[in-house]
Amino acid sequence: MDDFCIITINIRGLKRRYRDLTAFLAARRPHIVLLQDTLLSPNQRAAIHGYTRLRADRNPPAQGTAIYVRSDAVAREFTLPDVPFEAQAILVRIGANELLLINAYVSPQGQLPAHELQRILSLRAPTLLIGDLNARHTAWHCPATSRRGRALLRLIQQENLSLHHPEEPTFYPAAPNYRPSVLDVAVGRDLPFVIHTSVHHQLDSDHLPVEYLLTSALPRPLPAPRRRNYAKADWTQYRQILHESTIPQRFSSRE
């Protein structure tokens, strides 16, 4: 399969950063865009050229999320059960697989019960949940570990899930007494992909865009072995080369 690109951003207000976001996406052309913290009301437009959108607009205390699907990607909406955090989902075709892709946002004051997260990650396979979970742990390069981070890591270990995160911070707080952290992560179940994660230092949100590049987990097929036509071989020359390269039976030694 060809590489499949997903970009996630806690946009901290889509209307405010709409122009910069559209320019960034025009340059990167990801297949799927996951936005959290859009802060849109239902009457505000947020179309992006070349993409169809699935919105879950702000309804206090929710902050709003959105999924944008590139016009040539094959995807359909998937209805999730009610959970105590913001989440929306699509089923997207990637090669021979149909991936359940979940866009999630948990506010710093919100809840992330492990059993609820486990429930939506077990709906079908393969599943990939991406978003700002506000869960800190030194295991994914945060400067400290929070209760939510410990619960998330315990769930990942118990359920044999996979965790995908960049090697550098995704969140740079404005407050000088807070240190940068990795808050934007992905959790997968039974993924038939290899995922490469990177951060883009663009846009002016305190969260950086995070790119997840999905490639096939199957090894590339080896080239077919060369078939030799022995009927066309020059056996006379072969015997001559063999004769000239034969090690002599007698040789001298000082011992």
Image (tube, helix red, strand yellow):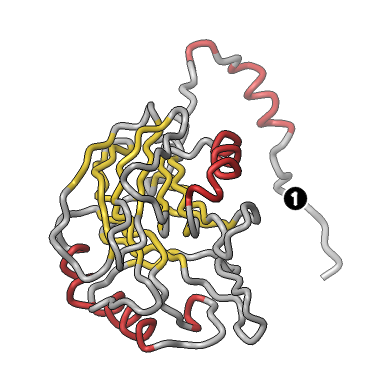
Query: Which of 200 and 122 lies nearest the eye of the viewer?
Result: 200
User: Where is 135 relative to 231, above or below?
Assistant: below
Q: Position of residue 169 (x, y in %)?
A: 58, 70
Residue at horizontal 67%, vertical 82%? 176
What is the count of numbered marks? 1
Q: Is residue 48 left or right of residue 169?
A: left
Looking at this rendering, what residue extends furthest in the top direction?
A: 232
Looking at this rendering, what residue extends furthest in the right direction?
A: 254
Q: Amino acid at mark 1?
A: Arg
Choose top left, top right, bottom left or bottom right for residue 247. Answer: top right
Query: Which of 45 and 160 lies nearest the eye of the viewer?
Result: 45
Query: Which of 116 and 52 lies nearest the eye of the viewer?
Result: 52
User: Where is 81 relative to 20, above or below?
Assistant: below
Choose top left, top right, bottom left or bottom right for residue 111. Answer: bottom left
> Where the N terminus falls, by quadrant?
top left
Q: Position of residue 153 (x, y in %)?
A: 35, 80
Residue at horizontal 36%, vertical 48%? 66
Looking at this rendering, what residue extends furthest in the front direction?
A: 43
> Where the C terminus falls, by quadrant?
bottom right
Q: Secondary structure at mark 1?
A: loop
Q: Position of residue 149 (x, y in %)?
A: 39, 82
Residue at horizontal 32%, vertical 56%? 58
Residue at horizontal 48%, vertical 12%? 231
Choose top left, top right, bottom left or bottom right for residue 46. Answer: top left
Q: Is residue 169 left or right of residue 188?
A: right
Q: Position of residue 86 (x, y in %)?
A: 28, 63
Query: Which of 201 and 178 lies nearest the eye of the viewer?
Result: 178
Q: Is residue 252 left or right of residue 2?
A: right
Q: Can you identify the residue that label 1 sits on? A: 250
